[in-house]
């Protein structure tokens, strides 16, 4: 696929692209909206995912060029990042506070940290709602209210995994705070993990050797050596537990062991948080920069074979240096103002668990060595252009080339940079290995290596900042393309979903820091910023440089005697002078031709500008001549439209009034009259004829009779009942009185209910 058909592909046709980019209200958020799986390209647009094939036999510029939108009903949020699984079967889709997993179709179909300083592991196949384990990189928030000087220290902006061969590097998680502090945890192992068996054997041998040395030098209980021996013993138990599982699932070089994280004892507890790291020496900062927040962190390692034996080395020394390959760990930290700190991981992390050490014997803070601070030139560029406000939305994301780990791509709001670490990593890593292997016998010690190795090489391969318009087109994704059938090897996407294919040169051709970056492969900046340039001059295609004419200036000659003899050396000098003169004449002819072409181009540009000026004048004159008539016609049409709208509003208002205030029917009037009569009959009116008043009178009379009866009974306790009423007759009288009492209470309750209903109906009407 060539460059121009790619830019015209319908997958990048996104209406209102800038509105989608600025719809997310969050400063300096990481964005990665593009992923490539083989020859398939996946693009995130708002809340949808588009997919198409880069290798199309008919060509993307043909009428058959198209894309498909993946069915993702659970992705109901604006997508800020997408990440492809190593197998290419799943796609992690992340928003500002949401995360979803999408199952991708077959190829060629024609863990995220949160701002609450937690890193969570999810099993999307069985339990997607609750995390399997959670790591806390910062202390949990206290309920006490108070003032904190640095709120940015509470925000984690990025994290990365370490690397290594025979240490805890691959099981270490590094987290970066917005303030620039770095924290780490080790060991971190997913609940279900596939680990190379060879790495476990190396790690077991490494930990066992340290434990044996610590046990031999172990001091009394409570000493530092005893604590060190206990820590190494705990590490050995952890590795032994993993090796027992690995031996049952597979063994041998190149095999993968299926292991499960320990679930009992101290080995099942979370690893302890280590940090913040001490950076020695302190990284340099820009004096006038107020944008010092950290953005992204990336851990890269560079593996190298042992150096070849030098002249004079013994066989034992050469056997030591060629025993096995070594790795140099490097951590890169980017900042908003364009600084990238390059840190060396010289002292590897040690595994530690919660509860393993007490507060009195807290371990010392880990250390990272600062190798250099790279200036990408962003701060100076925007400060000279008077656009420092653009740095508030800047986020420098770091990603490594999958084939060349020493090549780092940094994309941000002003374009794309390439950082080449290969030269100094080669020299420094070999010097470090020889210094560790042979000590003082090494040809170059570490101090000499640090003073002699050069810095990283950088190049601004894509510049999207426009000095004239004081604006830029932020780059939201950069993906390396390793496909021989495609003519480019790096694809960048701007915030306006404008694809920018880049055919990068070899990393050896990168310019060192401080060189002019104007020669980088930059597309038309005005087109990227405004998308519709009003006028493109012919003079912007090629930059014309005035030829140096000082070398053609006439040099005054000295007078020589007329009778001087013509020797062979004199003739040879004349010949050399004539050759130089011919060369200068040819160079001058080239300069004249270039100046003539430039003059012709300027004449054409002058004609175009005069023609455009005449068109603008003619249009202005036409508008001035017909402007009054056009204005009167537009005003008349606006007035007519206003009258029509007023009539429609009046009709709509009348229709609403008719529907909301309809007249009562005859049946409804009779019903309301009957309700009024019932209200008079039931409710108290002072005349004593209502049902409520009659019921109250009966109840009062009943209470008086009952009271008199009780008094009579108490006055004559020994009196015998009249012979006419026996016990059976008295029981019958009492039963009837109780029944009447219940009937009276029921009647009163019904009267009260009817009265309440009448009051509610009257209130509603």
Image (cartoon, rainbow, N blue to C red):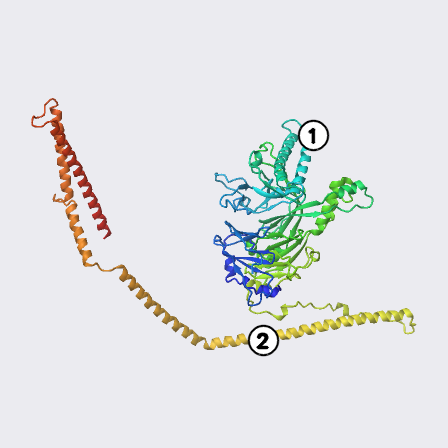
Residue 695 or 153: which is nearer the viewer? 695
* 596 shown above or below 343: below
Q: What residue is drawn where x is 52% and y is 40%?
A: 140
Question: Percent x, y for residue 170?
Answer: 63, 43
Comparing labels 2 and 1, the label whose residue is closer to the camera:
1
Q: Which residue is mark 2?
A: 610
* Residue 729 sits in quarter: top left
Q: Earlier in the sequence, mark 2 or mark 1?
A: 1
Question: Percent x, y for residue 520?
Answer: 65, 61
Q: Secondary structure at mark 1?
A: helix
Can residue 556 be seen in this snapshot?
A: no
* Neighbourhood count class around disc 1 (C-alpha, 10 Å): few under 14, some 14–19, many 20 upward: few
* Neighbourhood count class around disc 2 (C-alpha, 10 Å): few under 14, some 14–19, many 20 upward: few
Left or right position of 399 against 640: right
What label does residue 216 carry, if any? 1
Residue 501 or 182: which is nearer the viewer? 501
Question: Percent x, y for residue 290?
Answer: 58, 51
Q: What residue is drawn where x is 22% and y is 47%?
A: 757
Question: Percent x, y for residue 684?
Answer: 16, 44
Q: What is the spatial separation of the Cα atoms under label 2 and label 1, in whole angstroms?
A: 91 Å
Q: Secondary structure at mark 2?
A: helix
Residue 512 or 120: which is nearer the viewer? 120
Can residue 728 be seen in this snapshot?
A: yes
* 190 shown above or below 423: above
């Amino acid at each position: 696929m060539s460059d121009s058909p790619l830019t015209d592909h319908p997958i990048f046709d996104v209406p209102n692209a800038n509105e989608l980019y600025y719809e997310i209200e969050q400063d300096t958020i990481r964005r990665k909206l593009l992923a490539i799986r083989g020859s398939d390209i996946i693009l995130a647009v708002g809340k949808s995912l588009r997919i198409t094939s880069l290798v199309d036999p008919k060509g993307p510029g043909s009428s058959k060029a198209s894309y498909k939108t993946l069915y993702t009903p659970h992705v109901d949020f604006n997508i800020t990042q997408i990440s492809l699984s190593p197998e290419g079967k799943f796609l992690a889709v992340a928003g500002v506070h949401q995360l979803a997993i999408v199952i991708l179709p077959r190829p060629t179909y024609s863990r995220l940290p949160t701002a609450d300083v937690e890193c969570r592991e999810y099993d999307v196949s069985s339990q997607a709602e609750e995390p399997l384990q959670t790591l806390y990189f910062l202390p949990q928030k206290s309920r006490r209210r108070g003032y904190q000087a640095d709120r940015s220290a509470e925000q984690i902006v990025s994290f990365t995994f370490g690397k290594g061969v025979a240490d805890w590097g691959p099981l270490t998680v590094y987290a970066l705070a917005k303030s620039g502090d770095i924290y780490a945890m080790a060991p971190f192992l997913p609940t279900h993990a596939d680990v190379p068996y060879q790495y476990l054997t190396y790690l077991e041998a490494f930990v066992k050797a340290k434990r044996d040395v610590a046990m031999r030098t172990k001091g009394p209980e409570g000493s530092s050596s005893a604590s060190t021996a206990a820590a190494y013993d705990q590490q050995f138990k952890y590795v032994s537990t993993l090796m027992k599982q690995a031996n049952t699932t597979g063994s041998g070089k190149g095999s993968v062991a299926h292991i499960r994280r320990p679930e009992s004892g101290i080995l099942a507890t979370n690893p302890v948080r280590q940090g913040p790291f001490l950076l020695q020496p302190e990284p340099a900062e820009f004096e006038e920069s107020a944008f010092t927040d950290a953005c992204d962190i990336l851990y890269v390692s560079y593996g190298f074979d042992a150096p070849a034996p030098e002249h004079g080395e013994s066989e034992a020394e050469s056997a030591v240096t060629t025993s096995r390959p070594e790795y140099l760990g490097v951590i890169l930290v980017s900042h908003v103002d364009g600084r990238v700190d390059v840190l060396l991981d010289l002292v590897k992390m040690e595994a530690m668990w919660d509860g393993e050490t007490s507060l009195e014997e807290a371990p010392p803070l880990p250390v990272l060595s600062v190798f250099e601070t790279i200036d990408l030139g962003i701060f100076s560029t925007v400060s000279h252009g008077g656009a420092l406000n653009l740095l508030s939305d800047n986020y420098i994301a770091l990603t490594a080339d999958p084939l060349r780990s020493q090549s780092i791509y940094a994309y941000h709001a002003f374009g794309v940079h390439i950082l080449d670490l290969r030269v100094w990593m080669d020299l420094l890593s070999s010097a470090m290995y020889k210094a560790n292997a042979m000590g003082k016998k090494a040809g170059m010690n570490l101090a000499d290596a640090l003073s002699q190795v050069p810095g990283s090489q950088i190049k601004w391969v894509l510049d999207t900042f426009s000095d004239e318009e004081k604006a830029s087109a932020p780059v939201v994704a950069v993906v390396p393309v390793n496909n021989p059938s495609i003519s480019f090897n790096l694809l960048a996407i701007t915030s306006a979903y404008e694809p920018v294919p880049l055919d990068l040169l070899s990393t050896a051709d990168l310019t060192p820091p401080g060189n002019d970056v104007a020669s980088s492969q930059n597309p038309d900046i005005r087109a990227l910023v405004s998308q519709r340039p009003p006028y493109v001059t012919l003079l912007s295609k090629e930059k014309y440089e005035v030829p140096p004419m000082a070398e053609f200036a006439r040099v005054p000659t000295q007078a020589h005697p007329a009778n001087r003899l013509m020797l062979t050396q004199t003739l040879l000098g004349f010949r050399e002078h004539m050759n130089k003169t011919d060369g200068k004449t040819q160079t001058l002819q080239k300069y004249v031709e270039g100046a003539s072409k430039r003059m012709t181009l300027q004449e054409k540009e002058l004609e175009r500008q005069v023609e455009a000026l005449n068109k603008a004048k003619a249009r202005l004159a036409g508008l001035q001549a017909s402007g009054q008539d056009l204005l009167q016609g537009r005003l008349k049409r606006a007035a007519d439209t206003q009258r029509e709208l007023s009539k429609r509003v009046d009709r709509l208002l009348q229709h609403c009034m008719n529907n909301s205030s309809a007249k009562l029917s005859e049946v409804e009037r009779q019903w309301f009259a009957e309700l009024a009569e019932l209200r008079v009959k039931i409710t108290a009116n002072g005349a004593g004829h209502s049902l409520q008043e009659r019921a109250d009178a009966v109840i009062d009379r009943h209470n008086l009779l009952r009271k008199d009866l009780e008094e009579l009974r108490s006055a004559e306790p020994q009196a015998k009942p009249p012979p006419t009423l026996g016990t059976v007759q008295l029981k019958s009288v009492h039963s009837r009185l109780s029944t009447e009492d219940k009937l009276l209470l029921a009647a009163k309750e019904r009267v009260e209910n009817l009265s309440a209903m009448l009051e509610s109906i009257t209130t509603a009407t």
